[in-house]
Amino acid sequence: MNEQLSKTEIGKDALQESVEALATTVGEVATIITTAVKDVASAIGGLATEVFEIGDTARRAARAGSDTATAEDADIAE
């Protein structure tokens, strides 16, 4: 049995394969972009946490230094 595909069916198959390939590629690119955005947001969040912790540590150190200076001043005054 010799089945020949018409030019229309060949064109339809080529178009279908092209659309499927395009959809797959768009999906892969969307996944890459989504992952990149998530990773960037995570990195920025980590940086913000570090900055807050550094600021908190600096404030605690300043308070501790202030308390130490006050205690030393009291010892000198006696």
Image (cartoon, helix red, strand yellow):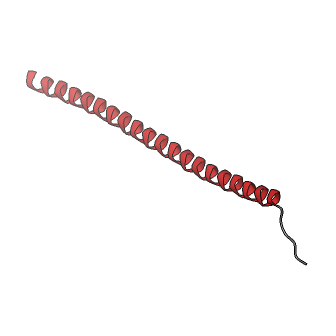
Q: Foreground: 76 or 65?
A: 65
Give the side of residue 43 with respect to residue 73, left or right: right
Q: Residue at x 35, y 35 (%)?
A: 51
* Residue 43 drawn at (x, y percent): 43, 43
Position of the N terminus, as image quadrant, is bottom right
Q: Residue at x 80, y 59 (%)?
A: 7
Q: Foreground: 70 or 34?
A: 34
* Residue 44 drawn at (x, y percent): 43, 39
Residue that protrudes farthest toward the right in the picture: 1
Position of the C terminus, as image quadrant, is top left
Residue that protrudes farthest toward the top in the picture: 77
Q: Residue at x 30, y 32 (%)?
A: 60
Q: Residue at x 41, y 36 (%)?
A: 48
Q: Tell me which corner region of the image, top left, top right, bottom left or bottom right, holds residue 58.
A: top left
Q: Foreground: 37 or 64?
A: 37
Give the side of residue 13 with respect to residue 58, left or right: right
